[in-house]
Amino acid sequence: MLHISRTFVAYLDEMDQLTVLVPKSRGVDGMAPFTMVAPGGEEIPLSVRRTEDLGETVKYVCWFASAFEFGATYWVRACSGEMTDVQIGAVVRTAAFDDQFFYEGKLGADYAKEQTIFRVWAPTATAVNVKLIPPDGGAARYVPLERGERGVWSAAVPGDWERAHYAYVACINRVWREAVDPYATAVSVNGEYGVVIDWEKTKLAPSSRPLPPLSSPVDAVIYELSIRDFTSHPDSGVTHKGKYLGLAEENTSGPNGTPTGLSYLKELGVTHVQLMPFTDFAGIDERDPSAAYNWGYNPLHLYAPEGSYATDPADPYARILELKQMIRTLHENGLRVVMDAVYNHVYDREQSSLEKLVPGYYFRYDAYGRPANGTGVGNDVASERRMARRWIVDSVTFWAKEYGLDGFRFDLMGVHDIETMKAVRDALDAIDPSILVYGEGWDLPTPLAPEQKATMANAKQLPRLAYFNDRFRDTIKGSTFHLPERGFALGDPGGREQAKTAIAGSLRALGGLFCHPLQSVNYVECHDNHTFWDKMAVANGHESETVRRKRQKLATAIVLLAQGIPFLHSGQEFYRTKGGDGNSYQAPDAVNRLDWEQKSRHEDDVRYIQGLIALRQAHGAFRLATEAEVLRHLMFFEPTPPSVIAYRLRDVAVYGPWTEIVVIHHHEEKRETIALPGEGEWDVVCDGEQSGTIPLRRVRHSLDLDGIGTWVLVRREAMGNEGGAGTEP
């Protein structure tokens, strides 16, 4: 009989290396040398390569010559005769482990009426069962899985298991752990179990109206919203408030008959709706969704929809079918759908399925063996590991194919590695190259080499990905994190040159960040931090509301007319406020919901933004796709007053109905006169009050600016080729 001791521990940290830790309190004399005992009883000598004094513990680094058999239990015996089992340690984070166990076959539950096949990747487990709870809620049944190639455990369970709840129970390091399938595509209430479903029953008839083509990412106008926030207001006019189906309701109206919900999105003219997280998340009790609020950046299950947005969270089919119906309805109304993809962290590392099934593999650790925290939420997913990368790419592919999604916004994308983001882009290209991929390219302190991170600094390595442009944001608005600081739109002329670079697509050739305009997502407001209106309450609180509304219209006009991809936060166009709350991720609905009464009070300003969107869409000169095109066609006026940024898009007849376009942004409440190029007449299609494609009036030689605002002037006749690239007198 083995004499088992817990007075010391042993970890497999490399394919041929053990770390043995002996507490000094136990006494270290007579412990070394050590012997490893294989499952069949073979004794394997351990050679102590290094000894370290760790204070209360002595560390022995031991090497062995024979191959280690994963899926079996090994023991280490000290000279004293005491024994301990070999725990699977840091070896899971080695390249050799990745190479030995990378698996490309099917994973998850594969349903048929006659049987369901279960497959799970758990290479360090010594035994795995699938726990099955019948649909009628009867007693759980445990079915042993068989270990196969590359650490995949599987079993075909006879019978019709549709709607059965299931989980995997794995023995790892002699501890049994229960985990939901990381590839579960349907889950029970609050994600407590995976659910076996018949995917044939979720298929909908194809959309009767195909989406309009999207030739380039710069043709997109992205509008970010929360499924819950967008319709939860008491006066939204929507029946299924805060639900998938609520966003699919057509012809809804609110106070004073103002269009709301989907009807409003169509009227506004945006092309893409970016939905805040709708994969299954923690923070909301799906049995009582109204009892709490959460944005959804607490990911639980990345292949299954959130239940709090469904009319019946207890029915695993409801959330799937209702989400699909919502997406199809948006498509039928000409709107593409972008998923907020949160793969950089999990809600609770220790309780996550990933950690339970392959402890230590899916997350990054620092040099001291502590979980990395570049995300700021206690864990960073190690996307550079091959099965973690596969889990992300498989998920994105699943959502694109099964739900027909048109884009993915990667939360904290800079935490991911470049190769993973390339793999995402390649996988989506194989489905539809027009699918957008963009994200937050912040450089966060995760233990990944700087040259490996998918950050803005490495944008050249990812030319078909776009990035939220924080330089654009802070140059136009002022610092997001220091509220009193003002950018150009808030009246500070100091950053005017940086603002010009941002407007021209933030190109490297002009001192910016990107290879071409397709990489710049231009914005001044999103769900994070204070709304633009709430920042101005601090930075420009000395000004009247009338003046501040002009400033917000100016900033939004800069976003919509700049080179790159414009991004709007829902309600930005009618001065959304969260009452000064700069982090409303779990504030109540009263803070987060869209206020349709507010929208009804600012119909003229909403129409102004609608006109700007129509103006952008009317002419490709606002949507240049290459660095060369921007440098050839866009020239800034010099000199101009410090309060003015003015530029000309010349010789652009090939892109749309006008040959010449002039755009002028002015941030002071004083009159200025701007000389116009050439001798001919110009049609004003946008001023501080109205915008669109229909001329408002005609001017010659000069334009009088009567305060804060944006002016756009166009004409159809050419004026020759005077001037050069960059600036003109």
Image (cartoon, helix red, strand yellow):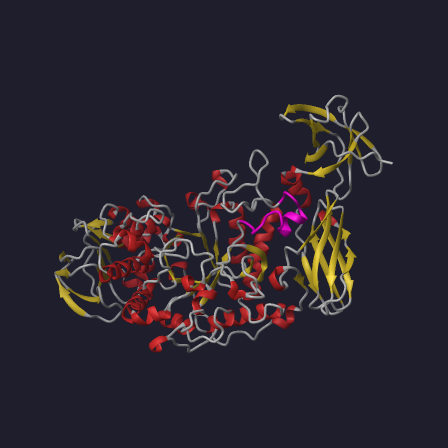
Q: Quadrant of residue 305?
A: bottom right
Q: Residue at x 38, y 72 (%)?
A: 264
x, y percentage for residue 521?
Answer: 38, 54
Q: Which residues are magenta?
A: 345-361
Q: Is residue 181 visible?
A: yes
**Quadrant housing the N terminus:** top right
Q: Residue at x 43, y 67 (%)?
A: 230
x, y percentage for residue 51?
Answer: 67, 23
Q: Is residue 506 visible?
A: no
Side (left or right) of 403 relative to 688: right
Q: In terms of secondary structure, what is the magenta stretch mainly?
A: loop
Q: Residue at x 46, y 43 (%)?
A: 444
Instruction: Work out whether residue 328 or residue 293 is closer to the camera in this orientation and state it.
Output: 293
Instruction: Work out whether residue 235 or residue 130 is closer to the camera in this orientation and state it.
Output: 235
Residue 109 included in the magenta stretch of the image: no
x, y percentage for residue 716?
Answer: 22, 66
x, y percentage for residue 631?
Answer: 29, 50
Side (left or right) of 384 relative to 8: left
Q: Residue at x 68, y 42 (%)?
A: 100
Instruction: Work out whether residue 544 or residue 65 is closer to the camera in this orientation and state it.
Output: 544
